[in-house]
Image (cartoon, helix red, strand yellow):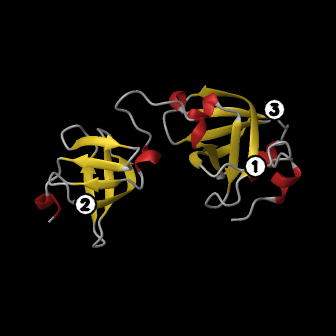
Amino acid sequence: MRRPESAAKAGVCDAAHPAIPADLVEVGTIAGAYGVGGWVRIATESAPEASVLLGTGHWYLSQGLGQDARPFPIESCRVHGSQLLARPERSLEREQIEALRGSAVLVSRASFPEPDENEYYWVDLIGCEVLDAGDRTLGTVGDVVDHGAHAILAVNAPDGRTHLIPFVAAYVAEVDLARRRIRTQWLAEYTE
């Protein structure tokens, strides 16, 4: 989709922030306007109170796959029920905000806080090589999916199959982000 003209006229692209970071990560979506005071509702990928959006005002919007990302500086942001409310630095009319509905909200990966020990951002796991219990390559992580009780690694195998491996201590022995490798206790016969 193309960026709405009303958004461009509203000053969504801020000339004071011309450089678009190469490490943008989608962390939410514009859900619409809130009230008449220029507030924006954000549906987040994580629990609102844990969202990285609360810690940075350097947001970017995209209506494509990130290639058309534009700065969207935020003055303030707060939790409101199951969503976030944000007030852009530049005042927007309700109609301008509604024209942005569905836009992806992105932030630089560099702005994420450091995770606790043995905690990982899912975006960092994608692309890691996955080894089985015998140190044989199973494939690479193509996605991480939340199935309620725990996350599941969707591992793209060289033969085109996808292996689903629970991301729990019983199956994941080591995560080495520096080497982009995950060692598992997964056995080859589990995938056949």
Residue 160 pos. (x, y %) = 31, 72
Residue 110 pos. (x, y %) = 59, 39
Tell me which corner region of the image, top left, top right, bottom left or bottom right, holds residue 139.
Answer: bottom left
Spatial CA distance of label 2 from label 3 is 54 Å
Which residue position holds label 3? 37
Spatial CA distance of label 2 from label 1 is 38 Å
Give the numbered dot on residue 19: 1
Secondary structure under the numbered disc 1 in the rendered image: loop
Which residue is rendered at x = 65% and y = 46% of the image?
30
Q: Horizontally, is 66 left or right of 76 in the view?
A: left
* Residue 53 drawn above or below residue 5: above
Q: Horizontally, is 148 left or right of 109 in the view?
A: left
Q: Residues within 10 Å of mark 3 (few under 14, many from 20)?
A: few
> Going by the picture, which residue comes out furthest to the bottom?
159
Which residue position holds label 2? 137
Residue 159 pos. (x, y %) = 27, 73
Q: Residues within 10 Å of mark 2 (few under 14, many from 20)?
A: some
Q: Residues within 10 Å of mark 1 (few under 14, many from 20)?
A: few
* Residue 192 drawn above or below residue 129: below
Secondary structure under the numbered disc 3 in the rendered image: loop
Type of the residue with mark 1:
Ala
